[in-house]
Image: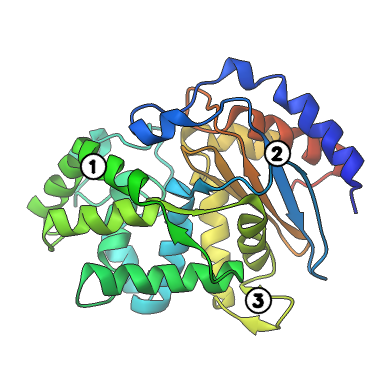
Amino acid sequence: MLSSEELKRFVNEAKKVAKDGEVATYIPELGKANPNDLAIAIYYPDGSFVSAGEVHKKFTLQSISKVISLALVLMDRGYDYVFERVGMEPTGDPFNSIAKLETMVPAKPLNPMINAGALVVTSMIKGDTVEERFQRLLNFIKELSDDDTVEFNESVAQSEFETAHLNRALCYFLKQHSIITEDIEQLMDLYTKQCAIEMNCLDLAKIGLVFAMDGVNPLTGKQIIPREIARICKTFMVTCGMYNASGEFAIKVGIPAKSGVAGGIMGAVPGKYGIGIFGPALDDKGNSIAGIKLLHLLSKNYKLSIF
C-alpha cells in the first residue's frame, strides 16, 4: 500500500503541469474551478484508503457518468438491444464530433464514450418520466459509491442545458435516423442532470473499486454490476475512456480509466483498487492534465499497467 506521504509527493510533482492546462469554459459553471486543484483517493478491497490533496472538494462527473449509465442500460436492456444502437469502436475524433455519424451506415455512434453514443445510451434508461429515469441512475450511483448524500449540481446542469447546442444537433441527427426516438428536450434535461451528478474523490474511488472487483462491492460482497457488464465497461474505459488520447494513455498508464471535463478521472486497477482523481485544468483533449501526469507516475512506480 502507498503511504500518504508518498502520494503527496506524487501530487506535488504532478501539480507542476497544471499551469499548462485550462479549465473547461464552454460550460460556464465549470470555468469557475481553481486550475491548481489536484486531489486523489485510492480505495483498497479491504475498505482502507489513502488520499492526498483537496479530496473533499466536490466536482461533477460529466463524461465519467457515461460508464455508469452504460452499466445501467446493459442491465436494463441487455447486450443485443444496446449494441444494435451504439457501436464498440474507438473513433480517434474529439468526443463531441459529429463527423463520423455522417459517414457511418447505419448512422449509429461508434461507441458509448463519445457524446453521440452517450446520448443514445441515456435515452435507453428505463422510466416513464425524466425524473423517474434520473432517480434510477442517481440511486444506482449512490449504491456504487456507498454514499446516500450524492446529488446533482443544479447550477451546472442548468448551465449545460442552456449551452448544449452541439449535443442537441447530435440528438436531432440521431433522431432523423431513428436511433433516438424520444423528445430531444426531455433527453437533454436527463443528460445534463446525469453529467452534473457530483461527488468527491473518495466516492469516485469507491465506484472505481466496484469496477476493479468485477462489479462486486468488496465490503458487502454484493454483486452490484454483473461481472460480464463490468468487463465490457472496463474494456470501453481502456479503448475509449480518455477521449482521443486513449491509445497514448493505454501505452503510458495502461489501466481502465474514464475522464470528465470537470477534471475528474476514475480508474479501476483490476483486482487491486479504485482511483478517484480531481484536477480541473485540462489538456487539449479534455483530460485532466495533472491527473494524467499523476496516473503516469503511479503506474510507472507501481507497475499498474494491465498490458
Question: Horizontal and vertical percent for residue 277?
Answer: 65, 44
Give the number of the mark in front: 2 or 1.
1
* Cα separation between marks 3 and 1: 33 Å
Q: Name the residue under label 1.
A: 167
For the residue marked with disc 1, what is the amino acid? Asn
Q: Name the residue under label 3.
A: 216
Closest to the observer: 61 or 77? 61
Identify the residue at horizontal 57%, vertical 25% (top origin).
Answer: 35
For the residue marked with disc 3, what is the amino acid? Val
Q: Residues within 10 Å of mark 3 (few under 14, many from 20)?
A: many
Q: How crowded is mark 1: few (under 14 residues within 10 Å), some or many (20 or more)?
A: many
Identify the residue at horizontal 48%, vertical 26% (top origin).
Answer: 23
Q: How crowded is mark 2: few (under 14 residues within 10 Å), some or many (20 or more)?
A: many
Q: Name the residue under label 2.
A: 253
Quadrant where the N terminus sits is bottom right
Residue 87 shown left or right of residue 46 in the figure: left
Identify the residue at horizontal 54%, vertical 37% (top origin).
Answer: 263
Q: Which of marks 2 and 3 is nearer the N terminus?
A: 3
Answer above or below: position of 208 versus 164: below
Q: Which of marks 3 and 1 is nearer the N terminus?
A: 1
Residue 7 shown left or right of residue 171 in the figure: right
Q: What element carries label 1?
A: helix
Kindly indicate the quadrant of the structure image that contains residue 92. Answer: top left
Residue 194 shown left or right of residue 260 in the figure: left
Closest to the observer: 171 or 24? 24
Question: Horizontal and vertical percent for residue 179?
Answer: 18, 58
Identify the residue at horizontal 64%, vertical 50% (top origin).
Answer: 201
Q: What element carries label 3?
A: strand
